[in-house]
Image (cartoon, rainbow, N blue to C red):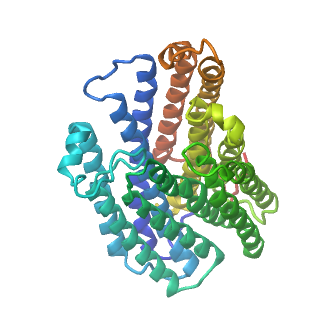
Amino acid sequence: MKTATLKFQSQSVSKLYFIGALALFVGQIVFGLTLGLQYVIGDLMFPAIPFNIARMVHTNLLIVWLLMGFMGSAYYLVPEEAETELFSPLLAKILFWVFLAAGAATILGYLLVPYATLAQMTGNDFLATMGREFLEQPLPTKVGIVIVALAFLFNISMTVLKGRKTAITLVLLMGLWGLALMFLFSFVNPSNLVRDKMYWWFVVHLWVEGTWELILGALLAFVLIKTTGVDREVIDKWLYLIVTMALVTGILGTGHHFFFIGLPGYWHWVGSVFSALEPVPFFMMTLFAFNMVQRRKREHPNQAAVLWAVGCSVMGFLGAGLWGFLHTLSPVNYYTHGSQITAAHGHLAFYGAYVLVVIAMISYAMPILRGREANSRRAQGYEMWSFWIMTIGMAVMVLALTGAGVLQIWLQRMPTEGAMSFMATQDQLRFFYWIRVGGGVMFLAGLLVYLASFFVGPGVEEDEVPANARLRTA
């Protein structure tokens, strides 16, 4: 193993964010597994942790740890791209502890205080912002998120302004600023239900199918530049093309959420056409990753990071692209909307596009943050095993949810007469729900293997490997 030093000392603040993100990731999966069991064991942990509370914790932890991962990735990437120290490392450290404390306090509030009481305690009567899926956070937490986001963006933007400007930092800043601006719609909660749902989708859709895609593209491009040695000009052209397609299809693709909420009928056409094109940027991302790896100018010693990056492009296309396309056309969505097919798409899309890109960044950056060019071959073996275990576990969950969704639609939604009730239909889906639990257990096992890789040293045989040895692609 060759030693390595950070190009800029301020990059070390990203280590805090990466460790915090992984800890919250474990919490998210534990609560997700709890939810899966509650589908088949209805009174599990009731009344201590009801289903609706466990679901809030599961989804909120997902958002918080991914945001923390994005922030850590930016703190590592931006100084290196800008070729200058971070504007304020102290501010970055303070923001981490504030963000972590606010997130922990919010989760404890969900678990320890009835949600209606929590709303009264936190000023929801003054400005009603609670009660919407993914945006359940109390008003003080939302205000805190805005303050942390603006201070973070100030720190990152000032670093870019005083240093070199690259396509990667430009795209990353566009995504991060867009993320922060779209979150402001979470404070808008009109009494008109149609407008309420429209503004809600401005946050949720324009995050995951808009601004987050820019962040994804920038992080993936950075990892591929570092691990393949391909010319920056080549990667920049791909990045601009992918980002353009992502914005065009993602913004107008918001229309697939407007099909049945009371907006004009032309959204059926706009939403269907542009949503059908949303897999294109993800397919381009897959071609991009494989093309860069094939054209690599050197064998980077950190082949685990390469695997996570390539896996991100493939699984992102399958989850956000293919599984999204399955139910995005309005005549199909009429039957599938809100079914378990939606859950299948959501799980695979988040895992493929965003979980894997954050792990790819951690896999590349963490060894350097720990003073080595790459992890040992033995530790990378653990990482690669964890990738396959988590990915297969996710595939099992997604296929089970897809099967459950198809049966749910067949029994409950398509019959014009004699359709089953919701709860009667759920009884018929228990087989698929148990399979999902099995996939969840497998996914958690893969995550634990990944965490174990941080504590694995080199094998005995590696003591005899020359320092400049390079691993072949697995």
Q: Quadrant of residue 101?
A: bottom left
Horizontal and vertical percent position of residue 439: 56, 27
Residue farthest along the bottom direction in this orientation: 162
| Picture quarter with the N terminus | bottom right
Instruction: Look at the picture and state if 86 lies above or below 276.
Output: below
Give 216 or 17, whichever is nearer the viewer.
216
| Picture quarter with the C terminus | top right
Q: Which residue is drawn at 55% across and 82% down?
A: 83
Instruction: Look at the picture and state if 53 lies above or below 212.
Output: above
Q: Which residue is drawn at 71% across and 37% down?
A: 331
Q: Is residue 359 left or right of residue 333?
A: left
Give 246 or 108, whichever is nearer the viewer.
246
Horizontal and vertical percent position of residue 397: 58, 29
Horizontal and vertical percent position of residue 216: 60, 59
Q: In this view, does 91 lie to the left or right of 365?
A: left
Q: Residue at x 61, y 39 (%)?
A: 345
